[in-house]
Structures are given as C-alpha cells and as structure tokens.
Amino acid sequence: MDDMYREVILDHYKHPRNYGKLEPADISYEDDNPLCGDRIRIDIRLDENDRVKEAAFSGKGCAISQASASMLTEEILGKSLDEIKQIGKEQILELLGIELGPTRLKCALLSLKVLKAGAYGITDADN
Amino acid sequence: MTDSLDLSNLRADFPVLAREIKPGVPLVYLDSTATSQKPAAVIEAMNNYYRLSNANIHRGVHTLAEEATALYEGARERIAKFINAKSAQEIVYTRNTTESINLVAYSWGRANIKAGDVIVITEMEHHSNIVPWQMLAAEKNARLVVIPVTDDGELNLSRFESILEMGPKIVCLTHMSNVLGTINPVAQIAEKAHAVRALVLVDGAQSVPHLPVDTQSLGADFLAFSAHKMCGPTGIGVLWGRKELLEAMPPFLGGGDMIRRVTLTEFRVNDLPHKFEAGTPAIAEAVGFGAAIDYLVSAGMGAVSGHEREIIAYALDRLEEVPGVKVYGPRAERKGGVAAFTLDGVHPHDIAQILDTRGIAVRAGHHCAMPLHERFGLPATARASFYLYNTQAEVDRLVDGLYEVKKLFA
Ligand SMILES: Cc1ncc(COP(=O)(O)O)c(C=O)c1O
C-alpha cells in the first residue's frame, strides 16, 4: 500500500501525458466509475492502416485512475484496434507497477474500460 | 447519567479500537457515520444468545423459545423507552433505515398517494430517503418536490414555505445530514407541515445514534434508524410510527408472524408491531441492539452529544488551518460530528488511501448523497466522522496525515 503512490504514478498524475481532447476524433468514448464519480473520456485518431496515431484522455479522477489513463494513452500508440481489444487487466497493473484491492482496481481499470468500449465501436460519448 | 464521558475507560469497551493496522500503527477510526464500532457488551450479548438461548420466537412453549421471545421483545421495550415512544407497539423491527423508509413508501404510500399528489424531500437526503419516493412518485404519477440546500449547508426554509402552498401529503427529511452534519429544525418544519395536514417522515439514521431523540417532542410521524450506526449489529433497524398511522396502514411483506389467522382464501393481520414483521426476524441482532441501547443509556446521550460537539469544534479548527482544505456544511455549533472536506489538487480517494497507510480510517466518495454533492459541484468528498470513543489526539493524527498527503502531492 505504501508504494501505491510510487514516483512514476505521481509523475503521471501531476504531469499527465496526452491530456485533452481530439476534435474531431475517429473514436471517442466516455464513462464513469459509479463508486467515486470519476469520469474519463478517451479520444483516438487512426492512421491510414487503422492504427492509433494520436490518443488523448480527459476528465477528473484520483491519482490511480489518472495515471493509468495517462500511461494507457502512451501505450496504445501504433496499436491496431484488435491489439487494443487484447489488452487486459494484468497489463494495466504492470504499467502501474502496484497491487490494488478491489475498490482501487476499479479506478485503475476505468480508462481501459473506456478505451475498449471505444475500440469495440460503441460511440455514444454521452453514455 | 454522567455529564461527560470517561474516554480512557470507554475506549477499552470497544475491542477493535485496540487494533493495529500495521505493526506499530494503531487504528484511528473516523468512519462511524458509515457504521459505528461495537462494544464488547454487544458482541457478548449476541454470543450468549447463541450459546444459551437460541430458538425461534413466538408460539414456542419450550424454555429456549420463551427466553428468546423475552429477549427479542425486551429489546423492543428498551428501544421504545430510548426514543420515548408511547408504546413498544410503535417500534417495528426492520433490517435498517433503508427498509424502514421503504416500508412507509410502500405501505402508507401506495394506500395514500394519488396522481398529482406532492411528496417533499430535501436536497441533502441520503439515497435511501430519495429513491423510494422516486419509485412511488413514478408509480402513482405523483410529484416529487425538493427543499433546496443553502450555500451554508442548511435547508432553505423560505423555499419550504412556498412548497407548503402546494399542499404536500408527506415531508421526508433527514434529522442530521450524513455529509454536512447539519442538524435540521425538525420540530419547526413538522409544525408547518402538520398545519397543511402533511405527514412528516424523519430519517434518524444519524440523529438517533448521536443526539437525545424524543419522539413525543420531535414532531415526526415516522422515524427510521439503524442499529449498526449506534453501537449495535448490522441487519436490524427500526421504523417508529404513531400508532394510529401504523394501524391504518396495510401490511408490507406477507407471511408467518404477521397474521392472526389464515385460510386458503384470506388472512387477518396480526396486531402491531407484528403486522409488519413477516418471517423469522433478526433475533440475535435484536438482542445485540438491546445491549447497544443499554450501553448508550449508561454513557448518557447528553454526554455523547456533548462530547461530539467538542470534538467537531476542535476538528473544524484544526482542519481549517491546513492550507487547501475546505470543510462543507454549517459551523460547529449547528452540526453533528461529521466533517466532509476536500483538499486542493488531491482526489478524496487518494486522501483516504494515504491516510489508511497511517491507520486512519476515513471515507471517500459521495456517501450515498450524489444530489447533495452535485449541489456543491463536487464529484466526491473525504469524510471524517466522530463518535463517543474518538479523541482530540485522533483529530491531531488526521491533521498530521493531511500534511503528509500534501507533501506527497506537492
Ligand atoms: C442519513 C442516512 N440515512 C440513511 C442511511 C442508510 O442507512 P442503512 O444503510 O443502515 O439503511 C444512512 C447510512 O449510511 C444515513 O447516514
């Protein structure tokens, strides 16, 4: 628990990478964590081969959810939608480098949930 | 009755308070608004019940059944006395505050609310005093009207006056907010509601554990509360209602115990309060509830609320000295022992997580009051809440912890 706020997590929280919105974007999706009300939106632009050219996230949340979103938007650059669909919980935890209890796991996985809904073509950004 | 609490002895009554969260890091439990800790007397009463007297209640003639019934009903008598009810028949056991409110919305509501009728709630309610009324209003095409909350975290009483002109059928409000700590002027509101013949349901989940509550001067027609927030076990709560009202209401759940006589085509309901207690109830929990009442009576509710007044005043002073901390709700003299706060630049979840590493248990989130958080434009708050066993030294540890959080996020 003590190292949950590792330097790298705090760094991503204080200096989020790819923070903002892409308008227009090829894929946009937004969702919240009903437990804490955190909300995250992810926008993606694809290149001619349908690989991620640009990714951005916006929204508010705790250090864990913001850091995981920030890391995820770096991680998916150059990936195809099929590759994105393969990303699992373990990879997110690996990126964060920490172990999490059930409540905080939801914070960590919110951005992945949003990203996957987008990748699977659910488009309702106000959902 | 004593005028102040002897904390050194009292803390020893609660076994969990001796716990260390990690070696050398003692627990600082600041989450009693969610659920209180339990004194050994309550744990032992439930244990003894199972070891010595366990049986199903009512209708049994053997010794254990008689003992179990006496314990179950004896607890009801003490609860009645605790809130100065006119009779134990006015005490209906439920699972918790939520079920008590649902019972009224379902039984009284479905019999009395018609299309176009007005049901009043407030903006500071817990979801348990919002959703049952939304469900009823949707089903009956009734109107749900909301008393707003002022910037200071109090009910806007002038808006309430104009709402009264709509001729509401029932006004449902919390006695004490579980976020802002606001203690609402129930008697004053009830007098006005009764003048237009509206009933008043009071959510006492936070008031009955923390303040002396007297149903004969409160002004309410219904009062709901939970044992687990007042030193008792989970799984049992109470609906208190004025006898005439409970008598006129149709039953809630059907089954054993709530009937006087059943044929294959019809039934006759049992007397109060059994009419509302279908099926085998939470017997051991009632026994534990009775022990919790005894415990609070011996501490003295005046002393409990006095202690909390002191500690919240101290906590607000100390919290407000931390740069970036904002506490929501009224000033200390107008509220109970609850401090919901934010810290600039740090999400409440992170605050709670870091405090946990220092053994400090606070809650983070919307505390089942999303509309209230929306009112203040907040997705979430961190909340420290106090009970009879908390000390000023624990407030100091909270504040030290917050400085640690600030350092980490600076
Ligand atoms: C003001 C208030 N009302 C209702 C409730 C619901 O209580 P329970 O969950 O015991 O039904 C709570 C507890 O969280 C509360 O604080």
Image: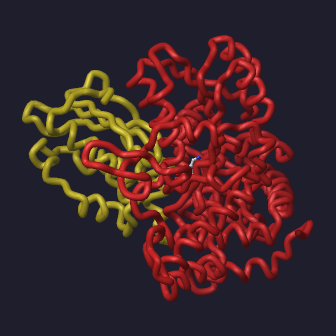
Chain colours: A yellow, B red
Residue B293 vertical position relative to residue B24 in the rendered view, above or below: above
Q: Quadrant of residue A55?
A: top left
Image point (75%, 20%), residue name: B195
User: With B407 as the anchor, is B84 left or right in this view?
Assistant: right
Residue A28 vertical position relative to residue B39 in the rendered view, above or below: above
Image point (67%, 37%), residue name: B221
Q: The N terminus of chain B appears in which quarter of the rendering?
A: bottom right
Nearer to me, B227 or B15 = B227
Whether residue B379 appears in this view of the structure is no
Image point (69%, 53%), residue name: B87
Whether residue B285 appears in this view of the structure is yes
Nearer to me, B38 or A74 = B38
Q: The C terminus of chain B appears in which quarter of the rendering?
A: bottom right
User: With A47 as the anchor, is A44 left or right in this view?
Assistant: right
Query: Residue B406 at what x, y percent from top left?
Result: 65, 57
Q: Which residue in the rendered view is the most extreme toward the right?
A: B3
Query: Residue B379 at what x, y percent from top left?
Result: 52, 39
Query: Residue B79 at what x, y percent from top left?
Result: 68, 60
Residue B157 vertical position relative to residue B358 in the rendered view, above or below: above
Numbered disc total: 0
Query: Residue B278 at what x, y percent from top left?
Result: 42, 55
Image point (17%, 44%), residue name: A78
Nearer to me, B152 or B174 = B174
Residue B295 vertical position relative to residue B256 in the rendered view, above or below: below
Nearer to me, A34 or B243 = B243
